[in-house]
């Protein structure tokens, strides 16, 4: 190992964020984003994981012993913390567990990290769920007002980060991510629609919930940009989203167009028809001006994201 390389640890390496960062790293090893770094990942379980075994560490964030062992082994210079319980309904129905995973384990991690080796940069991956959905488009400075418990845990986690990693944190709030999950992991929303439509099954998609989705690889590019420009990015928050504001219904129609699927299988619905589900914010569309100004990053349109999804789908 080249000791001059900066060690980057992705916590939650089997997430769409982690997978996207690995893909970007492997595809860009010769440019400034990758050739100065040595990449490591931590995962909770041994999935069918697309990364070298010697660079992958199994770590349960609910175990301080496993956190300690992993951080002592790696001693990272840069951490990207992408692990969380992201299932909104699970968080709502299991609040104590959600708090342990999304907030308390983060506190434990930062406490141990700061004791072993304070990093140059700690990037926390938050969520659009910190907003109420009533005042889109949202900038990084807008008031946080979550409408469900998952969103509350992300607000609490952001507060933990700003308090425990003063001077070296960055908070990134992604939007709805497009991409294929690692085999064995929970499938993304877009995968659910794609598989059903591919099989000729009808899907219901709401026309009154909006955001500006993008493929996870574009988010990964933004994260690597933050790492490359870390001297000017510390103690900043960035919103990373696509160029196009779309309802879920619009998104699924774009999916049909991109993949040449039958649009007649898409049933237009409203959020009120899913009263059994936990409330979601109606419109969390982001303003992404700050990321465009400070980073070498520009929001992709929806068909650029779906083109990347198509390449993944063909390799599946």
Image: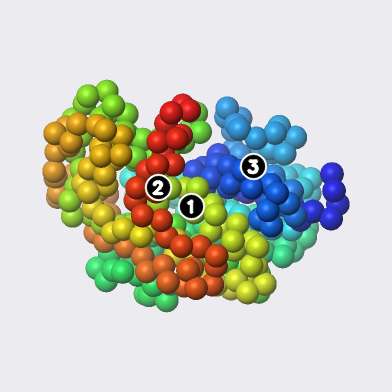
Q: At 60% from the left edge and 71% from the top edge, which residue is drawn?
A: 233
Answer with mark 1 or mark 3, whichever residue precedes in sequence: 3
Q: Quadrant of the N terminus?
A: top right
Q: Which element is circle 1 on?
A: helix
Residue holding disc 2: 305
Q: Residues within 10 Å of mark 3 (few under 14, many from 20)?
A: few
Distance of label 2 from label 3 (alpha carbons): 19 Å
State the image quarter where residue 14 is shown: top right
Query: Callout 2: 10 Å neighbours few (<14), some, many (20+)?
Result: many
The secondary element bearing badge 3 is classed as helix
The percent coordinates of residue 45 (x first, y second) are 59, 33
Percent x, y for residue 178?
40, 45
Residue 43 lies left or right of residue 185; in this view the side is right
For the point 54% across and 52% down, the residue is: 220
| Distance from Cα at disc 1 to Cα at disc 3 | 14 Å
**CB-based contact (under 8 Å), mark 1 and mark 3:** no
Give the class, few, some or many, for how many residues have Cα within 10 Å of label 1's Cα (few <14, many ≥20): many
| Residue appearing at x 77%, y 60% in the figure | 117
Q: Which residue is mark 3?
A: 26
Kindly identify the residue that appears in the image at 41 percent across and 56 percent down: 300
- Quick one: 117 or 112, which is closer to the camera? 117
In front of the other: 128 or 311: 311
Q: For the residues labelled 1 and 2, say whether their Cβ atoms are less than 8 Å apart.
A: yes
- The mark total stands at 3
Q: Is residue 142 left or right of residue 251?
A: right
- Does residue 49 appear in the picture of this structure? yes
Dot 2: element: helix
Give the residue at mark 1: 218
């Amino acid at each position: 190992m080249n000791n001059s390389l900066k060690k980057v640890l992705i916590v939650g390496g089997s997430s769409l964020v982690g997978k996207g960062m690995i893909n970007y790293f492997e595809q860009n090893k010769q440019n400034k984003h990758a050739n100065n770094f040595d990449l490591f990942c931590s995962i909770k379980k041994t999935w069918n994981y697309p990364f070298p075994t010697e660079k992958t560490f199994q770590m349960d964030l609910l175990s301080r012993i496993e956190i300690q062992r992993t951080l002592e082994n790696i001693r990272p210079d840069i951490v990207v913390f992408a692990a969380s319980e992201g299932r909104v309904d699970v968080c709502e129905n299991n609040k104590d567990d959600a708090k342990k995973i999304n907030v308390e384990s983060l506190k434990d991690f930062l406490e141990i990290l700061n004791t072993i080796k304070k990093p140059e940069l700690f990037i926390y991956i938050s969520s659009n769920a910190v907003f109420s959905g009533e005042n889109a488009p949202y900038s990084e400075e807008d008031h946080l007002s979550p409408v469900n418990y998952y969103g509350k845990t992300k607000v609490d986690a952001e507060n933990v980060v700003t308090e425990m990693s003063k001077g070296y944190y960055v908070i990134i709030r992604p939007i709805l991510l497009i991409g294929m999950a690692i085999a064995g992991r929970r499938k993304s929303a877009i995968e659910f629609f794609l598989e059903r439509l591919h099989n000729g099954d009808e899907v219901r998609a709401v026309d009154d919930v909006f955001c500006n989705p993008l493929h996870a690889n574009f988010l990964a590019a933004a994260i690597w940009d933050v790492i490359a420009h870390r001297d000017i990015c510390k103690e900043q928050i960035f919103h990373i989203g696509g160029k196009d504001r779309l309802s879920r219904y619009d998104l699924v129609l774009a999916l049909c167009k991109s993949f040449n699927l039958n649009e007649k299988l898409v049933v237009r619905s409203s959020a009120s028809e899913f009263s059994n589900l936990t409330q979601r914010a109606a419109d969390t569309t982001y303003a992404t001006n700050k990321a465009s100004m400070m980073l070498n990053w520009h929001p992709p349109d929806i068909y650029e994201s779906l083109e990347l999804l198509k390449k993944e789908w063909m390799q599946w």
